[in-house]
Image (tube, rainbow, N blue to C red):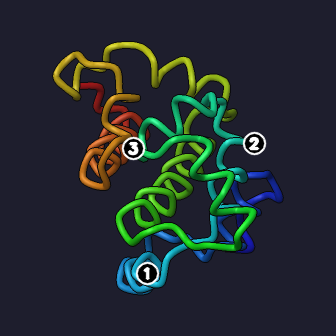
């Protein structure tokens, strides 16, 4: 991971050991649950509002705040979702050059995603995989 600059998203990837090359380990970490602080780290770099991000996790912001205060971990599904979001934002930063550009793209209909805004797909780990596939197509110049 040393080839990634020290940006907020790369720091989060290191902190939570989120990587696309070690899917098995990432799923194992998700099963253990990530600390609620992961939510706040993603909030800091993602450009999503706390309402958007907590809505994607299907949790109230108050619940996430309480989890952080109590030192609780998120469940496996939310943990996997957040870990995958970190790797997605990492890839996006590589491709778009900056996260504000990616955030604008997330909110516009994408051809490769049924002409729906990619933001909607952040709600499930599978949806995040679809966005990652779309980013790879963009990276290779194959705009669907």
Mark 1 closeness class: few <14, some 14–19, many ≥20 residues within 10 Å: few
Mark 2 and mark 3: span between their CA atoms?
19 Å
**Res 20 → quadrant:** bottom left
Q: Which mark is residue 22?
A: 1
- In the image, 129: left or right of 48? left
Between residues 62 and 49, which one lies in front from this camera angle?
62
State the separation of the CA atoms marked 2 and 1: 25 Å
On residue 99, which mark appears? Answer: none
Q: Which mark is residue 44?
A: 2
Which numbered mark, 2 or 3, is in the foreground of this view? 3
Where, by quadrant of the figure, is residue 72 drawn? bottom right
As helix, strand or loop, the secondary structure at mark 3 comes to loop
**In-front residue for pair 130/30:** 30
**Which residue is denoted by mark 3 in the rendering?**
58
The x, y position of residue 68, in whole percent, is 70, 62
Rendering coords of residue 56 (x, y %): 42, 39
Whether 15 is drawn above or below 67: the answer is: below
Task: Say if mark 2 contacts mark 3, CB within 8 Å.
Answer: no
- Which of these two is toward me, 11 or 59? 59
Q: Earlier in the sequence, mark 2 or mark 1?
A: 1
- Foreground mark, 3 or 1, reads 3
Left or right, 113 with reference to 50:
left
């Amino acid at each position: 991971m040393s080839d990634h600059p020290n940006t907020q998203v790369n720091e989060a990837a290191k902190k939570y050991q989120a990587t696309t090359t070690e899917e098995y380990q990432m799923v194992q970490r998700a099963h253990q649950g990530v600390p609620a602080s992961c939510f706040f780290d993603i909030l800091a770099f993602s450009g999503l509002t706390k309402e958007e991000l907590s809505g994607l996790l299907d949790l109230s912001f108050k619940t996430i705040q309480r989890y952080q205060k109590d030192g609780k971990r998120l469940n496996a599904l939310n943990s996997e979702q957040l870990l995958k979001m970190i790797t997605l934002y990492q890839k996006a930063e590589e491709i778009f050059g900056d996260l504000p550009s990616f955030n604008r793209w997330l909110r516009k209909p994408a051809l490769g995603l049924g002409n729906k805004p990619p933001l909607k797909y952040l709600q499930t780990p599978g949806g995040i995989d679809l966005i990652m596939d779309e980013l790879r197509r963009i990276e290779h110049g194959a705009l669907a």
